[in-house]
Image (tube, grey):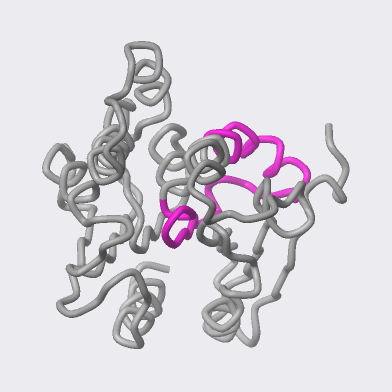
Amino acid sequence: MKNMTAFPHKRLHAIGETKNKTVLMYHGWGSTIETQMLLAERLAQAGFDVILPEIIYHDTRSPLDDHFEKAIMQTYFWKTIFESIDEMNELLSVLNLSKEDTILYGSSMGGFIASGIFFKQSGFAGIVNVNGSSSFVTSETIFRDRDGRHPLSDDELALFKSYDPKYCSRDEVAPVLFLHGLEDGVVPIAGQEDFYSHSPRKDSVLFLKYEGINHSISEDMAKDILDWFKTNF
């Protein structure tokens, strides 16, 4: 087992009356845990413990020279997501977290990670995915069409499907919140819409869409996130 230093993170303790739940927050591509601190602080004030783990190839964990250089992005974006999904059980053990008391939160790439974990494993308390996708094959197809790249090969498709929440056996009994800007040009909403259209339990999924919002989190979105936490926990 890895020691704590193998999973560097920031932890915020609940302020006031605690909900006895921990929010595990994943940031976006080329970002850092610091970008999540404002919302993390608001969640702590609402009574939740919050942990912001550093993501592989970011912060101090073998960071890349330029996350937004095209070749680097195409090589490491999905590698980062898949490795983060693979290390979840070890992360829970090292941080001494129980699934049933852990709510997953992710924005952008972090949303891909959170959904990849939540729908592949049962037992988590809930999930928030902001401007991410839960349909990996669909989103990668969109990315490749946009960049003029060749389609997924058979081997690549098999790999993607092994992680893709759309192809996981899932039962969304825990509350699910999707939020997405309708004008998102970075991670188009079509990926999340594809997953939602195939979801067998739409009654447990709240999918909020925001007009005039690109790849960002507006104050209205932040308020809706906090309201969802207060309502469900």
Tell me the quarter of the picture where residue 115 sits: top left
- Residue at the image position 24 percent from the left and 69 percent from the top: 181
Q: Position of residue 180 (x, y in %)?
A: 26, 65
Which is more toward the observer, 61 or 69? 69
- Residue at the image position 34 percent from the left and 35 percent from the top: 165
Tell me the quarter of the picture where residue 214 sits: bottom left
Q: Residue furthest top?
A: 154
Tell me the quarter of the picture where residue 216 sits: bottom left
Instruction: Report the number of discs.
Output: 0
Magenta span dominant secondary structure? helix
On the picture, is 65 further left or further right than 201? right
* Above or below: residue 146 compared with residue 188: above
On the picture, is 6 further left or further right than 220? right
Which is more toward the observer, 41 or 96? 41
On the picture, is 197 further left or further right than 19? left
User: Residue 88 in magenta?
Assistant: yes
Looking at the rendering, the stretch of residues picked out in magenta corresponds to 82-111
On the picture, is 132 further left or further right than 14? left
